[in-house]
């Protein structure tokens, strides 16, 4: 049986509001096939491309250069195809868009969403 959103987040609520919102979104998407498909479709619409509907979403996936997008969508083979960076209060750092785009390009990814 799946645990509640609050139970899932209780031990992780130490970060910023942005982190809490990202963890909540990833958890909800991982718990519902319909919600995951709707979220993936939203990304497809915004990116104007086709993504694999069976993407798995993870939070804070650290890359080779220590870059850490808020959420990554990976396909069945484990390839990151989309990176998501949630921004509520802070602006982008200089390295964020550049390192994320480099990471996607090196891995044959499709898009970056803010």
Image: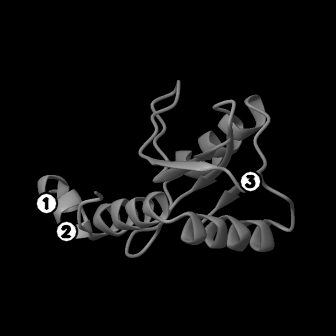
Q: Relative to residue 94, is residue 80 depicted above or below?
A: above
**Residue closest to the eye, 79 or 32:** 32
Asked whether the beta carbons under mark 1 and mark 2 sit within 8 Å of each other, the answer is yes
Task: Tell me, yes or no, if residue 15 can be seen here.
Answer: no
Q: Residue at x 35, y 69 (%)?
A: 21
Asked whether the beta carbons under mark 3 and mark 1 sit within 8 Å of each other, the answer is no
Q: Which mark's residue is nearer the viewer, 2 or 3?
A: 2
Q: Residue at x 64, y 73 (%)?
A: 38
Cα–Cα gap, marks 3 and 1: 31 Å
Residue at the limit of the structure toward the right, as seen here? 49
* Quarter in which the N terminus is drawn: bottom left
Neighbor class of circle 1 (other Cα within 10 Å; few <14, some 14-19, many 20+) is few
Question: Is 94 on the left or on the right of 23, as rendered?
Answer: right
Which of the two discs, 2 and 3, labels the residue nearer the N terminus? Answer: 2
Q: Secondary structure at mark 1?
A: helix
Residue 26, given in percent of the width and then of the height, sits at 43, 59
Q: Which residue is mark 3?
A: 111
Asked whether the beta carbons under mark 2 and mark 3 sit within 8 Å of each other, the answer is no
**Residue closest to the eye, 17 or 76:** 76
Q: Quadrant of residue 8?
A: bottom left
**Residue closest to the eye, 40 or 19:** 40
Q: Which mark's residue is nearer the viewer, 3 or 1?
A: 1
Q: Relative to residue 60, is residue 18 depicted above or below?
A: below
Q: Which residue is mark 2?
A: 6
Cα–Cα gap, marks 2 and 3: 30 Å
**Residue closest to the eye, 1 or 83:** 1
Q: Relative to residue 8, is residue 100 depicted above or below?
A: above
Question: Is 4 on the left or on the right of 18, as rendered?
Answer: left
Q: Residue at x 55, y 71 (%)?
A: 35
Q: Secondary structure at mark 2?
A: helix
């Amino acid at each position: 049986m799946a645990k509640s959103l609050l139970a899932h987040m209780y031990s992780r609520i130490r970060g910023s509001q942005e982190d809490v919102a990202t963890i909540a979104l990833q958890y909800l998407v991982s718990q519902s096939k319909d919600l995951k498909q709707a979220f993936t479709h939203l990304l497809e619409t915004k990116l104007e491309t086709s993504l694999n509907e069976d993407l798995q979403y993870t939070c804070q996936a650290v890359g080779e250069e220590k870059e850490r997008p808020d959420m990554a969508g990976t396909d069945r083979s484990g390839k990151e195809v989309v990176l998501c960076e949630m921004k509520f209060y802070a602006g982008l750092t200089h390295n964020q868009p550049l390192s994320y785009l480099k990471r996607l390009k090196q891995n044959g990814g499709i898009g970056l969403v803010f």
